[in-house]
Amino acid sequence: MSCSAIGRELSAPPGSDAQSCGPGACGAGPTSTDGAGQGELPGYRRWHFVSSFLETPVGPVPVVKTSLERPDRVGAALVRLGVGRGRYRVAPGLYAVGAPGPESPVLVTANYKLTFDSLRKELAGLNAWILVLDTAGVNVWCAAGKKTFGTMELARRVAACGLTEVVSHRRLVVPQLGAPGVAAHEVKRLCGFRVVFGPVRAADIPAFLEAGMKATPAMRRVEFPALDRVAVGLVEFANERRTMLWVALALLALAGIGQGVFSLQRAWLGLWTGFAAYMLGFAGGNVLCPLALPWLPGRSFALKGAVAGLAAGAGVWAFAPNALAGLGLWLGAAVAASWYGMNFTGSSTYTSPTGVEKEMRAAIPLQGVGLAVALALWRLGVGGV
């Protein structure tokens, strides 16, 4: 059984290597299934998306399904909410779709399972090989920036899987978003395979292959549609749970301490009004900002978030105890939205790494001043000091 289809479990035998995939490391040749289910090795499990195994010169290679099933959809939903994101990965190695042969194309991808699923579901009716790189469970674009989806890993994985014995051609189809990490001429020098950069979207791969591996200008265009932008923002609801708890405790303490040492009535008023304003800012930065991104002014995500926060934060006037507190709550919501809006500096096609640093250096001091003023106004409004 090829190790590229099996996830390593805690009971895996010491010294075994489920991350590499070569004739030696992958157990190519006869395999024992004593004590395990069909196609399984003791101590390993078989993924639900593996339908069978294809015999190759380097041993059996798992054939994956092209339809997503309930575990895939449930897993995707949880990951979108930030649950188990760091562990949502498949074993790197070689996989098969359909009944590929020596002339079938080799499509390269990352071992983040959402990325892997996005690719395999678009390959229905095709015969192809999928070469999965070890990107530590990170998608192609981000991994390319970190160089884990890169030249050395690609060349190493080609060698580890014995790809030269599986296919007769010497072409690798690499997703365009992986280009920042892959030096095509170095890949050619290191392993003898020529890199052909494929389309941005996996959905265009069938047409790309049908056209003789030629991409149209539309296939090269990087887009960031509203649905994808909102999906990125929703992850923050899970990521920021601990921050929310600390914000609530800080608001409770800041509002309660003062005249009379500590006032429970003032603490409660400060807690719920302050936290409601914070959540309006949170929604402004993580939902409204990405949704309205093309229409918000400026290129700075901190500014875009602040504008979205002013819009979302206008809701504080529905529950503000007075004008002074309302002004502080509104400003606080804008600051929170500005902070969360900056998250998109690393998630969009707008900003370079140096642009991210430049924006943060300029925005964070202003956000700090804004937060201090907001807290002072809010604190005076809920009962003085």
Image (tube, rainbow, N blue to C red):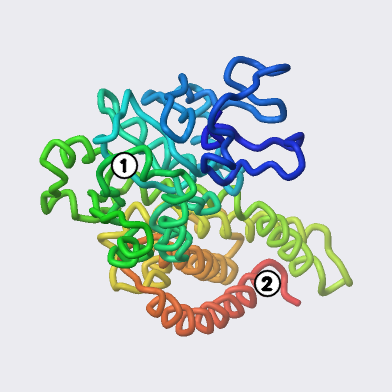
Mark 2 lies on a secondary structure that is: helix
Percent of width and height locating residue 48:
53, 23
Picture residue at 37% right of the left edge, 55% below the top: 290
Please rate how many residues cluster around mark 2, counting C-alpha atoms within 10 Å: few if below 14, some from 14 to 19, many from 20.
many
Picture residue at 28% right of the left edge, 28% below the top: 127
Asked whether residue 312 is in view, the answer is no
Which quadrant of the figure has residue 167? top left
**Tag shown at residue 379:** 2
- Residue at image mark 1: 106
Amino acid of disc 1: Val
The image quadrant where one finds the N terminus is top right
Percent of width and height locating residue 44:
66, 30
The answer to whether residue 30 is above or below residue 348 is above
Percent of width and height locating residue 286:
46, 55
Which quadrant of the figure has residue 345? bottom left
The answer to whether residue 297 is above or below residue 208 is below
Picture residue at 36% right of the left edge, 73% below the top: 352
Percent of width and height locating residue 297:
28, 69
